[in-house]
Image: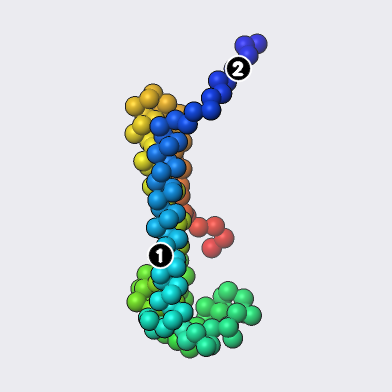
């Protein structure tokens, strides 16, 4: 039986450095936006959909009951605000906070897509295909097209 040997190196590859660079910048942008959007909300610069003084009264409810209650009492939407429905409410102080969360969640997809060309150039087809597949799966999951239990 032929023995498999793996060459270990302490040097990061070009793709690893690119991934880390994009991840670092995306994390920084997301973190700064978290502080900015939270300040817009908590200091009342942007009006919230649910008044700040009333929000804690809903915290003890299960998620579905919470969504029904805030929709009935404040949002008055045709459907409960699940998935990407928050985008319609982006002008409200309590929903603008979702933008940096989406950025922080999506930066990994951008990282994977950025390293794919370099992996193919290097002839590392297996890793390139895995990185591409990972980006597609994450994008599909974020889109809401893939769902479990519905």
Marked residue nearer the N-terminal end (1 or 2): 2
| Secondary element type, mark 1 | helix
Q: Is residue 127 above or below residue 106?
A: above
Residue 108, how many percent across, how many down?
44, 48
Can the viewer see residue 6 in this picture? yes
Q: Quadrant of residue 101?
A: bottom left
Q: Residue furthest top?
A: 1
**Which residue is label 1 attached to?**
33
Q: Is residue 107 above or below residue 9?
A: below
Q: In the rendered view of the protein, which quadrant contains the N terminus?
A: top right
Q: Residue at x 43, y 78 (%)?
A: 41
Q: Quadrant of residue 106?
A: bottom left
Q: Quadrant of residue 96?
A: bottom left
**Which residue is label 2 attached to?**
4
Q: In the rendered view of the protein, which quadrant contains the C terminus?
A: bottom right
Residue 31, how many percent across, how many down?
45, 61
């Amino acid at each position: 039986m032929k023995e498999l040997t793996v060459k270990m190196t302490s040097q990061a590859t070009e793709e690893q450095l690119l991934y880390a660079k994009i991840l670092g910048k995306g994390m920084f942008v997301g973190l700064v936006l978290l502080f900015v959007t939270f300040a817009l909300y908590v200091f009342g610069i942007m009006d919230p959909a649910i008044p700040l003084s009333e929000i804690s009264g809903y915290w003890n409810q299960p998620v579905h009951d919470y969504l029904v209650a805030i929709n009935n009492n404040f949002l008055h939407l045709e459907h409960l605000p699940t998935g990407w429905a928050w985008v319609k409410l982006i002008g409200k102080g309590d929903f603008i906070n979702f933008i940096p969360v989406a950025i922080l969640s999506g930066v990994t997809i951008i990282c994977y897509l950025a390293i794919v060309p370099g992996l193919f150039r290097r002839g590392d087809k297996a890793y390139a295909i895995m990185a591409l597949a990972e980006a597609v799966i994450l994008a599909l999951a974020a889109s809401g097209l893939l769902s479990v239990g519905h």
